[in-house]
Amino acid sequence: MPHLCNAQNPSTPTTAIGFIVEALRRRRDRKMTPFTTLYCDNLPRNGEILQKAVLAYADLIDPTLAEYIRDNATFPNTVVDRIVPQEQESDYKYPNRLLQVRDRAPIVTEPFWQFVVEDNFTGDKVSQENLTGKYSRKSTQTH
C-alpha cells in the first residue's frame, strides 16, 4: 500500500516512491522523456516490484499520471551479485589500514561482483564498452 502521507501533498514527497512519482509527473508536464528507474536491491523481480508500488501510489493521486508512467517509464529488473564472506577478526583493521578511520561494523567483500540490468530503458543508456556490468534481454533472478 502506498504511503498515504505523500498523497496529501504529492508535490512535496517524503518517501522514495513519492519522489519518483513526483519527478515523473514533472517530466511529463514539461514534455521531457521519463527516466529509467533502477532498483538495485537484490530481490527477485525488483523492477516489477518497484513499478507496482509506483503505479499504486500514482493511481492514488492521479490516475492519468499512473497511465502515463505505465505507458512511458521503465523499471528494469536487476541482479546484483556481490559475495560477502563470513566476518573475520581482520575485517575490523581493514578500514583503519585503508582509510585511517575506525569502523565498528565493516563489511569486507570478495573482489568478485556482477551487476546485470534488464535491457529495458526509456532512452539512452551507457554503451556496453563503458559498462562495468552487463545488459540482459530479460533478468531471470530467482531466489
Image (tube, rainbow, N blue to C red):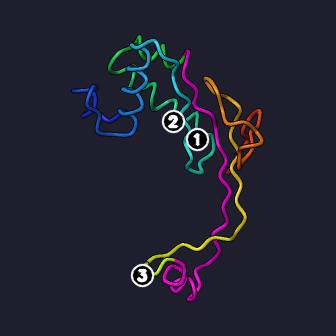
In the rendered image, the vertical position of residue 5 relative to residue 31, given as above or below:
below
Identified at 29% across, 33% down, the residue is: 13
Which residue type does callout 3 highlight? Arg
Q: Which residue is mark 3?
A: 102
Mark 2–mark 3 contact, CB under 8 Å?
no
How many angstroms separate mark 1 from mark 2 (CA)? 6 Å
* Position in image of residue 121 (x %, y %): 64, 27
The mark that comes first in sequence, 3 or 1, is: 1
Viewer-nearest residue: 57 or 111: 111
Which element is circle 3 on?
loop
Which residue type does callout 2 highlight? Leu
Which residue type does callout 1 highlight? Asn
Q: Which residues are magenta?
A: 71-98
Apparent side of residue 121 relative to residue 65 in the rendered image (left or right): right
Which numbered tag is attached to residue 50?
Answer: 2
Q: Does the magenta portion include 93?
A: yes
Identified at 39% across, 22% down, the residue is: 58
Which numbered tag is attached to residue 67?
Answer: none
Q: Which residue is mark 1?
A: 46
Badge 2: how crowded within 10 Å, few (<14), some, or many (20+)?
some
Which element is circle 1 on?
helix
Q: Nearer the viewer, mark 2 or mark 3?
A: 3
Apparent side of residue 56 relative to residue 50 in the rendered image (left or right): left
The number of numbered discs placed on residues in the rendered structure image is: 3
